[in-house]
Amino acid sequence: MSGFLEASVELIGDKMMFEGKAGDFPPVITDYIPPLGEGKGYMPLQLFLISFASCTGGSIAPFLRRMGKHVAGLTISAKGVRREQHPTGFESITLDIRLVSDDVTDEDLKKVLTMAEETYCPVWAMIKNNVKVSTTYEIIAEAL
């Protein structure tokens, strides 16, 4: 894996809408709510929540599978509470994890969450000492 990543954004119009691109992937539109923007795209902090949730999931699913566990489904909802004063970044984020599996235990999930937080999720590492992160989870037994 390369240590170098690149992305770019280009302003669209006369407010705060941007088209973001990385590699050969489809563009992503970001915008702000009126009056600053037109509300026609993701707000940048929404994309951050998507990045954090997918980074965490990118640790959970493969590590459970390496443990020989079956992962039939995984949904992570990220909810952030913003600071009142500028910069209005997140003061806290809650990750609500819904895992569908017939053999993952609470201990298994807690173990891979700790691995994500402490070692493997770079997004979590970047915010660890700046944003309070809490997790909730539900393991749903898959019908056999």
Image (tube, helix red, strand yellow):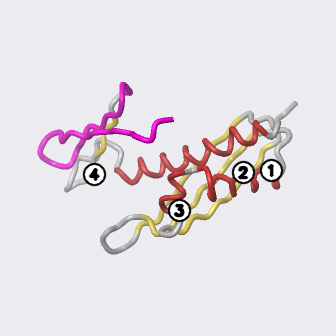
Image coordinates of residue 133 in percent, x first then y, are: 57, 64
> In this figure, which residue is indicated by the disc labeled 2?
112
Q: CA distance from mark 3 to mark 1?
A: 22 Å
Q: Is residue 132 above or below residue 21?
A: below
2 and 1 marks in contact (CB < 8 Å): yes
The residue stretch that appears in magenta: 1-25
Mark 2: amino acid: Val
Q: Is residue 49 above or below residue 7?
A: below
* Element marked by disc 3: strand
> In this figure, which residue is indicated by the disc labeled 1?
108
> In this figure, which residue is indicated by the disc labeled 4?
32
Mark 1: amino acid: Asp
Q: Nearer the viewer, residue 112 or 26?
A: 112
**In magenta stretch: residue 8:** yes
> In this figure, which residue is indicated by the disc labeled 3?
93
Q: Name the residue at 77% across, 48% down.
A: 139
Viewport quadrant of the C terminus: top right
* Element marked by disc 1: helix
Q: First in sequence, mark 3 or 1: give its number.
A: 3
